[in-house]
């Protein structure tokens, strides 16, 4: 695994603090060699940065940026369970993307590419993952996008 | 793992019989150290106990109770593949919650807390899990909530 | 595992070529003993074969056929990561089904049975899986159904 933090720095990204558990669930769980990361919203600097519905009041470009922000937050959640040892991360296994979609909006893949492209930017070939992307009616807090992640540790 | 059945008894809960496969799928599958539990509906005494849409005809309180019932049923499904050996259950890994949501309802997390809180009541710290919660338009049989689960065995 | 390719042939099914990655994600990822297959659309001969919404312009019968086609495509994705060694496939672990659903359509299970029945036809008892089936508002390209899969390797 290349130097993930160097790569993030070159992208001008500083990972936020690992999100705190806000209820009886946690940002990420280690299960054997897998890390399951909770569904991430596009929070930035403590606020929800992208609200609304694709196909209505959120553009594909903003949806893409929202999915990228979810992936940044997903890495922060991952960081919280690997003790900073990014060399342990061998593969991005799965991305599950939910896009708040107005009737007739069918470009969910272009939106979730914001997460996928970011993960490959950061992890290279090991960032290529299996993916599901679907359109849903409503997301927590009115978020435009929610993305969950699975990683493989070595 | 504390005595799960004692804990359930102290909560006044007797697990229902492990649900039967109703088609070519099964309530739970063991895959290595993981148990994947099928999406559970809020069935109680053989009938669907919570129907409708959050934000319309189902209150957050009832949605919370529905998610809790899904978790009870999820434990029954888990019980069916661990031969009653609850000490083998090391961690609740993931909760995936789908909430039938009317337009504009964005409190899915408060609903799925019904499952999360129950799992921590029963398993303690090992009950804290990764989670995704989203709002969908329609669920099987008109259920208000559907929840799937992943557990880690020792 | 029985001779999967023989079984497919007896069903008159020739697997399509493993789908190519169309973005920064891939058709399937191997993570330890698990294979995670990306959400499959009902593509057939290079085109989307089933578009629309269950409960509106797509019948349950066509939805069932769409889910079956998703499962065929899921096996093609699986084939791409097991080097043709079908004996390595020990179990179908999970099916995650998303059904594009008009308001009031609650027969998602009957639709996703198209994937479940097919997997048991092909793999026998090892084809019985955990499953979640939900109704969503919109799917990529306007597809009627999207299904993702998890398999266990020996």
Image (cartoon, coloured by chain):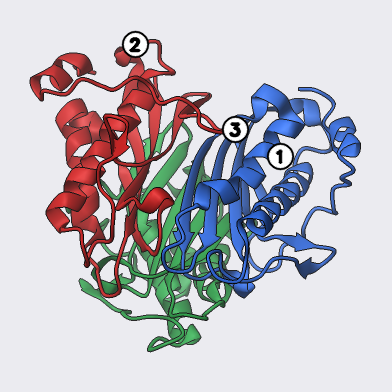
Chain colours: A green, B red, C blue
Q: Residue A93: percent from the left, percent from the top?
A: 55, 48
Residue on which the image places disc 3: B24
Q: CA distance from mark 2 to mark 1?
A: 32 Å
Query: Which chain does the numbered disc 2 sit on?
Result: B
Which residue is located at x 19 percent, y 31 percent? B125
Same subunit under labels 2 and 1?
no
Image x and y of residue B149, in percent: 38, 38
Tell me if mark 3 has few (under 14), some (14-19) or many (20+) residues whose alpha carbon lies within 10 angstroms of its own: many
Q: Circle 1: is it few (<14), some (14-19), or many (20+) Cα within 10 Å?
A: many
Residue B3 seen? no
Secondary element at tag 1? helix
Residue at left 48%, top 42%?
A88
Left or right of B25, for residue A14: left
Question: Which residue is painted at 47% across and 73% down in the image?
Answer: A10
Residue at image mark 2: B84
Of the numbered discs 2 and 3, the one sitting upstream in the chain is 3
- Report in which chain the residue with disc 1 lies: C
Residue A137 lies, in percent from the top left, at 38, 70
- Labelled disc at residue C118: 1
Instruction: State how far apart marks 3 and 1 are (Cα).
Output: 9 Å
Q: Secondary structure at mark 3?
A: loop
Q: Are marks 3 and 1 on the same chain?
A: no
Depth order, front residue of C63/A110: C63
């Amino acid at each position: 695994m290349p130097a993930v933090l160097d790569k993030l720095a070159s992208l001008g990204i500083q990972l936020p603090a690992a999100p705190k558990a806000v209820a009886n669930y946690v940002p990420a769980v280690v299960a054997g060699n897998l890390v399951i990361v909770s569904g991430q919203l596009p929070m930035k600097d403590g606020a929800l940065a992208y609200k609304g519905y694709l196909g209505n009041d959120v553009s594909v470009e903003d949806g893409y940026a929202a999915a990228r922000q979810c992936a940044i937050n997903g890495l922060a959640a991952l960081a919280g369970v690997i003790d900073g040892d990014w060399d342990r991360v061998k593969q991005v296994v799965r991305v599950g993307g939910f896009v708040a979609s107005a009737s007739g909006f069918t470009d969910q893949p272009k939106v979730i590419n914001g997460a996928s492209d970011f993960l490959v930017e950061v992890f290279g070939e090991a960032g290529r993952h299996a993916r599901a992307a679907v359109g849903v009616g409503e997301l927590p807090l009115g978020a435009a996008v929610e993305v969950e992640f699975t990683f493989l540790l070595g």
